[in-house]
Image (tube, rainbow, N blue to C red):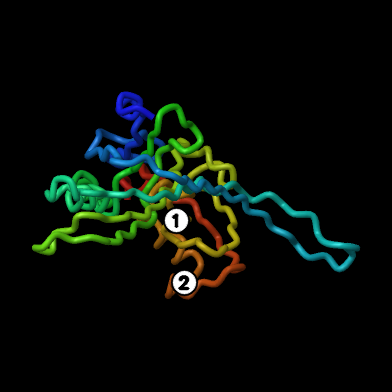
């Protein structure tokens, strides 16, 4: 492959945007972008569906599964950073950009609704791996250092979990923000994640905890049946 061909290759990028200001809204303006030095060699895409089975003593084999809902897509990839040719701070600067995806933005803190940026991975015409999501995990391994201890090479493993943009009232299990629905707690769930899926607001996990008498959210085990209550109407709260 000639140098000219390599120079025109489409480069992958990660874009961090302001989280939506309200449920159902689209993400806001761009906070930062990271053009990847090296396109990933592997992309791992996963998606789950949730089924519920009610045991029956009269069933000959097993009870028919009942479809409960579809889980978000999760994209996992590794980002390789290298500054051996320049010996500058570009590796740490890139890591700092990625770390921004793990903390609330200033704008969300100002609205008193803390939320981390929404993240989007983009690479040419790929559609299945390009979606708005949130950074669910990030780990950085520094593998080479300069004589002064400055990182010159790093591998960053990250996972992006799809964020729903369905408008209020379109949740298939609830029908509206004031309806009640049921959910079977599965491995990988958390009250914050359930609140985000149900209400579009991860900070509303306390509503679920109170409705189910949960004192320690970390003690929940897979198989626990939870009630997902509707949120109080915003207008009714203002009138009180």
- Res 214 label: 2
Q: Where is residue 29 in the image (x, y as percent from the top left)?
A: 25, 33
Q: Position of residue 113 (x, y in %)?
A: 28, 50
What is the tally of numbered marks visible in this picture? 2
Q: In this view, does 124 lie above or below 205?
A: above
Whether residues under marks 1 and 2 lie with C-beta atoms below 8 angstroms apart, the answer is: no
Q: Nearer the viewer, residue 85 or 54?
A: 85
- Res 173 label: none
Q: Which of 232 and 38 is in front in this view?
A: 38
Q: Which of 152 and 64 is in front in this view?
A: 152
SS class, disc 2: loop
Quadrant holding the N terminus: top left
Q: Nearer the viewer, residue 226 or 28?
A: 28
**Is residue 86 rendered to the left or right of residue 69?**
left
The residue at the point 14 percent across, 59 percent down is 146
**Mark 2 Cα shell of 10 Å, populated few (<14), some (14-19), many (≥20):** some
SS class, disc 1: helix
The residue at the point 58 percent across, 58 percent down is 183
**Mark 1 Cα shell of 10 Å, populated few (<14), some (14-19), many (≥20):** some
The residue at the point 14 percent across, 45 percent down is 86
Q: In this view, does 190 lie above or below 169?
A: below
Query: Which residue, as the protein is rendered here, is positioned at the far left?
Result: 148
Q: Where is residue 36 in the image (x, y as percent from the top left)?
A: 30, 40
The answer to which image quadrant residue 51 occupies is bottom right
Q: Nearer the viewer, mark 1 or mark 2?
A: 1
Q: Whole-Å distance between the Cαs marked 1 and 2?
A: 16 Å
The residue at the point 38 percent across, 34 percent down is 122
**Is residue 189 rendered to the left or right of residue 28?**
right
Q: Position of residue 156 (x, y in %)?
A: 32, 54
**Which tag, 1 or 2, sits closer to the chain's start?**
1
> What residue does disc 1 label?
193
């Amino acid at each position: 492959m000639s140098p000219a061909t390599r120079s025109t290759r489409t480069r992958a990028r990660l874009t961090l945007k302001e989280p939506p200001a309200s449920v159902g809204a689209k993400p806001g303006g761009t906070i930062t972008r990271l053009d990847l030095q090296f396109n990933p060699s592997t992309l791992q895409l996963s998606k789950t569906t949730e089924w519920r089975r009610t045991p029956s003593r009269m069933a000959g084999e097993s009870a028919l599964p009942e479809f409960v809902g579809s889980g978000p897509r999760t994209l996992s990839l590794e980002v390789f950073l290298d500054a051996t040719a320049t010996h500058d701070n570009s590796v740490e600067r890139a890591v700092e950009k990625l770390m921004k995806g793990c903390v609330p933005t200033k704008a969300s803190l100002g609205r008193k609704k803390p939320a981390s940026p929404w993240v989007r991975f983009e690479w040419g015409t790929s559609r299945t791996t390009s979606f708005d999501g949130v950074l669910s995990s990030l780990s950085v391994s520094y593998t080479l250092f300069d004589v002064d201890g400055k990182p010159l090479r790093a591998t960053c493993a990250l996972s992006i979990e799809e964020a729903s943009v369905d408008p209020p009232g379109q949740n298939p299990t609830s029908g509206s923000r004031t309806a009640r629905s049921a959910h079977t707690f599965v491995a990988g769930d958390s009250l914050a994640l359930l609140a985000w899926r149900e209400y579009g607001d991860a900070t509303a996990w306390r509503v679920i905890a109170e409705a189910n008498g949960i004192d320690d959210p970390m003690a929940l085990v897979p198989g626990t049946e939870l009630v997902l209550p509707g949120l109080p109407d915003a207008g009714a709260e203002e009138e009180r």
